[in-house]
Image (spheres, grey):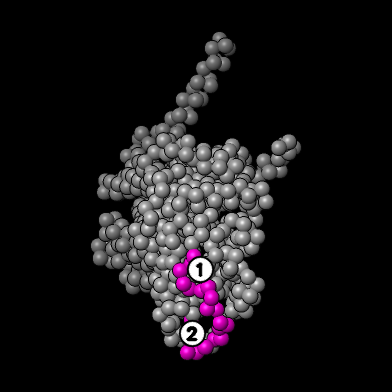
Amino acid sequence: MPTLRARRVPILRARRVIDLLTAPFSEFAFMRRALAGCVALSVGAAPVGVFLTLRRMSLMSEAMSHAILPGAAVGFLVAGLSLPAMTLGGLAAGLAVALLSGFVARSTVLREDASLAAFYLISLAAGVLLISARGTSIDLLHILFGTVLALNDDALVLLGGIATATLGGLALAYRPLVMECVDPLFLRSVGRASGPVHYGFLALVVLNLVGGFAALGTLLAVGLMLLPAVTARFWATDLTGLIPVAMGTALLASAAGLLVSYYGNLPTGPAIVLTAGGLYVASMLLGPRGGLVWRLAPGRHLEA
Amino acid sequence: MSAAPAPARGALAFRGLTLGYARHPAVHHLDGTVPAGTLLAVVGPNGAGKSTLLKGIIGEVAPLEGEVAHPGLARREIAYLPQVAEIDRSFPISVFDLVAMGLWRRVGPWRSLRPHGRAVAEALAAVGLTGFERRPIGTLSGGQLRRALFARVLLQDARVILLDEPFAGVDARTTAELLDLVVRWHGEGRTVAAVLHDMEQVRRYFPVTLLLAREAVAWGATAEVLEPGNLRRARRLCEAWDDEAPVCRGAPPAGPARHPHGHAHADHHDHDHGPPHEHAA
């Protein structure tokens, strides 16, 4: 019966596609764990990335991810390849660099980016020195590319905690943070919130980079923070749009990246970031808010 | 917008105030008082230290020597409209949100803006920006942004208002409207200090003037301050930094500055330093 066949084939095809998308997660616990970790990271890091790009501090997170290295290295030297030790070390190093560079920027002639550049280079060199003093290149690869397919309970709790702290912190400091971004001088002139908000935000950046470093490694920790945030600029104009779009993009990139790495037998961290990169390129071309294609055909001007 | 102030709140007192950058004074040994409710114009040539004086009052520039006192008034209660605002105009925020920042002292980080919607709308109407609420600040022209910042100052409801060249780049009609606002503030008993370059404006609207050229050349009733002799002297006094300048040995306790190292001052006994005469507007 041709009519019945014609109806059944698309249904079967759809079921196969759904199977392809869900089977890796339903069959393998490590894939579920990886997904859960990436979801936590996406929800926390993406809004932080939105504020970073709006403050023109995009590259600051890249620098900061290097600054984490010596702390992680010290943790590694003390306790081996242990997540809590390396996380605590990274957190300490990152916060130290963030606070020091923030302090120097606020009390000397140096601008934030310049003082951060100075401190992160010192920190990175110290980290490389520490790692090369003991340890092999395989260990280094672990630190750089992360262990997203081997997330244990500790790591998941850590990632979930960081996401919770980030969302809570952003919710509490949302208004002064926006004011600090738009008009820092005004915020200084009306209240005492400017300093705490600035440092608190830097702390959130470090926190999320350390979280990302557990899941994706230092080299790619920045990816889930920045690429979705930059992508969102092509789909939304104000903060209430940018933050959810960035979160959604990060979630999509995480899930798709995990699947790509599963079926393609590819390293997971780069697969996720490259997926996010693909979404960025597509948005850059097609995004309705200033995408390249729309620029080419802007339409005739309005009357007023 | 609010009740009349207590008599002393809103006064500014300078005691041997020296402000500057890298040890070079931009404002040198300034003494005097701005009584509460004064409508003061600060005039002087470029580089005379006018903006620095305002920054010193709100504490953005720390004194090299001496002090600024504002008895009974926290530094946060002074509204300040900078000459070049540090505003990031590419940030995606609406005019409404920018202006509503002026409510910070009342709403803080968490309280709702909703009860203040009317106040914001009225402030926007007062500067002629009704209908601009939802516009992103990046789409405003320079003059429109200036007006939005005026609306923000309006919402701050501050006892002391410092305006640094508030009308630069603003068209004539808007300037007139904004000047009305300034006069209204004066009528409400607020202390207003404005850095200005348009002497006609100063003569017409500002009863008291401080003529600054690193030091106070003259300070008092506008008509007496803005005479040709004073203006000439102000232009002469205001020169570039001297890299070889010796360390200042300190000023005499009051009166015209006379320094042992003597970078020559013309005589200016008549109007300077002393408390200015108060004139009703």
What kind of element bears circle 2? loop
Q: Tag 1: residue type?
A: Thr
Examine the image and state in which quarter residue A81 appears. Answer: bottom left
Q: Residue at x 59, y 79 (%)?
A: B237
Q: Residue at x 63, y 51 (%)?
A: B175
Q: Residue at x 30, y 66 (%)?
A: A74
Q: In the rendered image, which residue does mark 2 sit on?
A: B258
Nearest the eye: A13 or B2: B2
Q: Is residue B2 magenta?
A: no
Query: Can residue A24 be seen from the camera position used here?
Result: no
Query: Is B170 displayed left or right of A127 in the figure?
Result: right
Q: Earlier in the sequence, mark 1 or mark 2?
A: 1
Give me the chain letter of mark 2: B
Q: Which mark is residue B52?
A: 1
Nearest the eye: B238 or A244: B238
Above or below, B203 relative to B139 = below
Above or below, A243 relative to A16 = below
Examine the image and state in which quarter residue A191 appears. Answer: bottom left
The spot of residue A209 in percent (x, y) is 39, 55
Examine the image and state in which quarter residue A19 appears. Answer: top left
Callout count: 2
The overriding secondary structure of the stretch rendered in magenta is loop
Give me the chain letter of mark 1: B
The spot of residue A241 in percent (x, y) is 50, 39
Q: Which residue occupies the extreme top position in the image? A: A1
Above or below, A21 relative to A166 = above
Q: Write the start and end of the magenta stretch as one range.
A: B257-277
Alpha carbon separation for disc pair 1 and 2: 22 Å
Q: Residue at x 45, y 34 (%)?
A: A21
Q: Tag 2: residue type?
A: Arg
The spot of residue A72 in percent (x, y) is 33, 62
